[in-house]
Image (spheres, rainbow, N blue to C red):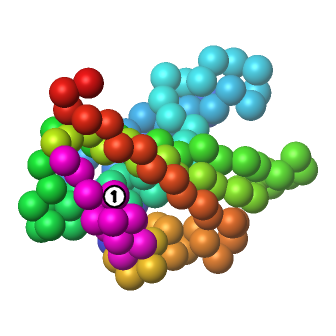
Amino acid sequence: MYAGVTWHEGLSFTGTARSGFEVKLGSSQSGGEAGGGFRPLELIGIGLAGCTAMDVISILQKKRQDVTGFEVTVDVEQADEHPHVFTKIVIHYLVTGNEIDPADVERAIELSRERYCPASAMLGKAAAIEDDYRILSAGG
């Protein structure tokens, strides 16, 4: 894997990866605006959400669950002191569909956490990670 950033001005950067995609990064630490981009630690949260989301939806599809909507959000608590490391992470899964089996959702989350998601494995060495899920019927 390769990842890098190119500086523009102030605390504004563009991140790139071998995949060819770009992402804007910024910070409001120096009293200015956010530089028109994500803060670096936000990208870690997004990376965790994306990593586990890809695992869980893939597993649910293999289990032939009729998922019509799927969201993963991450809430992070950080230390008050610098370097403001993550101290607690809660991953929330929202699965919408028809006759979704809660046991399949629980198993998919468990497999992501314990076997497949490297972001969860790495961050779990630094902070407590919890998860929860909700299932909504596609009909309302």
- Would residue 79 appear left or right of 42 to someone viewing this image? right
Is residue 68 in view from this perspective?
A: yes
Extent of the magenta region:
99-111
Where is residue 46? Give x, y as percent: 45, 47
Judged from the image, the secondary structure of the residue bearing numbered disc 1 is helix
The kind of secondary structure the magenta stretch mainly shows is: helix
Residue that numbered label 1 is attached to: 102
Q: Quadrant of the C terminus?
A: top left
**Which image quadrant: the N terminus?**
bottom left
Q: Which quarter of the figure has residue 51?
A: bottom left
In this rendering, position of residue 48 left or right of residue 22: right
Above or below: residue 3 compared with residue 30 = below
Looking at the picture, tell me which residue is in the foreground, 104 or 7. Answer: 104
Between 57 and 82, the one nearer to me in the picture: 57
Direction from residue 112 to residue 66 in the image, left or right: left
As drawn, the residue found furthest toward the bottom would be: 115
**Is 121 inside the magenta-drawn segment?**
no
From this view, report whether residue 103 is shown above or below residue 111. above
Residue positioned 26% across, 57% down in the render: 101
Q: Position of residue 55 (x, y in %)?
A: 28, 65
Q: Residue at x 76, y 49 (%)?
A: 78
Q: Based on the picture, tell me whether residue 105 belongs to the magenta stretch.
A: yes
Query: Crowdedness of circle 1 by 10 Å Cα count: few (<14), some, many (20+)?
Result: few
Residue pictured at 14% horizontal, 67% vertical? 63
> 115 or 61, which lies in front?
61
The disc labelled 1 sits on which kind of residue? Pro
At which x and y percent is residue 102? 33, 58
Can residue 40 be spotted in the picture?
A: no
